[in-house]
Image (spheres, rainbow, N blue to C red):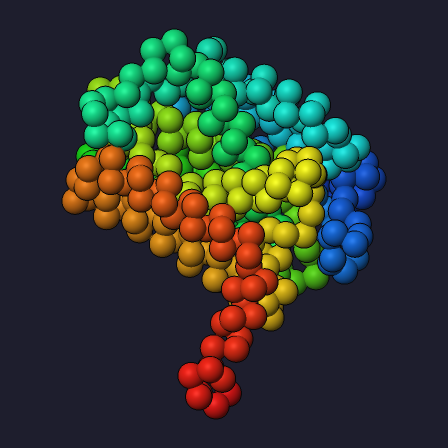
């Protein structure tokens, strides 16, 4: 692994992101790329939405200067540039959900058709043999890419959540690539991770970075979503696949389940599935009494558990059908729990009294 671990690209991505986060703050105010408090967005002061732009630019600069990211594949950065631009426009002008969705499908098409990075096989997820998609894989990839992009966009609701969840998944992916002997590819997720770390320092107000709050914005959450799904598809398809497709599903399991549960609940109520609200997982944790920071830790630990399940399933080669139906089972339980979360929380709060335990 050490032979393929290059410190210069990582240092470059880190430093460029750090510089841009500082330099772009006054520009954000000048161009109106800021987030203001509202009934749905409860934070103090006007906060720049430049985290995603800085992360993208840092990865681009580090890759061009050192040539470590997906060599000879500029289509990744083309798709990323479009998704970041879309996010910036959405942050600035609050685009319609349908218009944003249409553009996301366009970006997904760059990945699937232009870059030919699409899903050709789902593996033996039903236990009846390998599920080969052939040309249908293009359409299925479009749906998956847009789904993951929006999953990360939806989960980005409290400080550090989208960035922290991305780090968990990227580092898990790095571990998989190392474990399966694909160490030549470890710089791909690591460069992204290196660019995310300085953003988290500002976003979470680490010591030395307090007083300079910066948000990732839609440009950032959609960029990390696109990056992660690009990497997962790239490393689960073809003869040189590093791990199985169902393992990739578990890695992004929590964001996907949160999105699916929210959309199902909104549809049940007759609401638009794309309409924003305050019923996300982090909202539930906070309304249950946890602080923003404790909610962050709890959700990241929960997301890590999904990754651990994926890791164990891959290491011990648990049959794909068992991994798939286990995921579906957890999804159903998760969705039902979220739908009745307030009843569940009331039951949990009353449980000590019912058991005769003094609080």
Q: Nearer the viewer, residue 132 or 333?
A: 333
Q: Is residue 322 left or right of residue 232?
A: left
Tell me the residue at 35%/36% (across/down).
248
| Above or below 84: residue 166 | below
What is the x, y in percent for residue 202? 61, 55
What is the x, y in percent for residue 322? 24, 40
What is the x, y in percent for residue 257? 47, 44
The image shows a total of numbered marks equal to: 0
Tell me the residue at 62%/38% (across/down).
267
Residue 299 visible in the displayed image: yes
Check the image and name the residue furthest to the left: 316
Residue 51 visible in the displayed image: no
The quarter of the rendered structure image containing the N terminus is: top left
Q: Nearer the viewer, residue 314 or 89?
A: 314
Q: Is residue 154 left or right of residue 127?
A: right
| Above or below 289: residue 187 | above
Tell me the residue at 37%/41% (across/down).
328
Q: Is residue 311 left or right of residue 76?
A: left
Q: Is residue 61 left or right of residue 123?
A: right
What is the x, y in percent for residue 60? 52, 29
Tell me the residue at 53%/53% (across/down).
338
Check the image and name the residue furthest to the bottom: 358
């Amino acid at each position: 692994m050490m032979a393929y671990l290059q410190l210069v690209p990582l240092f470059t991505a880190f430093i460029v992101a750090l510089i841009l986060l500082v330099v772009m703050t006054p520009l954000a105010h000048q161009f109106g790329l800021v987030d203001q408090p509202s009934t749905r967005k409860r934070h103090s002061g006007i906060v720049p939405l430049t985290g995603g732009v800085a992360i993208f630019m840092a990865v681009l600069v580090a890759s061009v200067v050192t040539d470590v990211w997906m060599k000879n594949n500029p289509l990744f950065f083309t798709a990323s540039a479009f998704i970041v631009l879309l996010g910036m426009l959405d942050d600035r002008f609050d685009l319609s959900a349908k218009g944003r969705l249409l553009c996301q499908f366009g970006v997904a098409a760059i990945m699937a058709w232009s870059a030919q990075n699409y899903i050709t096989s789902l593996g033996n997820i039903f236990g009846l043999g390998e599920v080969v998609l052939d040309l249908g894989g293009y359409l299925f990839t479009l749906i998956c890419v847009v789904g993951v992009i929006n999953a990360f966009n939806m989960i980005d609701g409290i400080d550090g959540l989208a960035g922290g969840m991305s780090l968990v998944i990227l580092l898990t992916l790095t571990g998989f690539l190392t474990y399966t002997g694909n160490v030549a590819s470890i710089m791909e997720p690591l460069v992204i991770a290196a660019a995310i770390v300085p953003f988290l320092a500002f976003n979470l107000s680490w010591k030395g970075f307090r007083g300079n709050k910066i948000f990732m914005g839609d440009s950032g959450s959609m960029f990390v979503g696109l990056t992660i799904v690009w990497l997962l598809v790239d490393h689960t398809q073809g003869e040189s696949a590093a791990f199985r497709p169902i393992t990739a599903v578990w890695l992004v399991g929590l964001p996907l389940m949160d999105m699916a549960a929210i959309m199902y609940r909104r549809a049940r109520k007759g609401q638009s599935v794309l309409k924003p609200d305050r019923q996300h997982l982090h909202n539930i944790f906070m309304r249950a009494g946890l602080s923003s920071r404790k909610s962050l830790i709890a959700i990241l630990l929960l997301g890590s558990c999904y990754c651990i399940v994926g890791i164990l399933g891959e290491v011990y080669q648990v049959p794909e059908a068992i991994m798939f139906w286990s995921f579906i089972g957890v999804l159903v339980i998760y969705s039902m729990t979220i739908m009745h979360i307030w009843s569940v929380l009331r039951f949990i709060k009353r449980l000590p009294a019912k058991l005769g335990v003094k609080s």
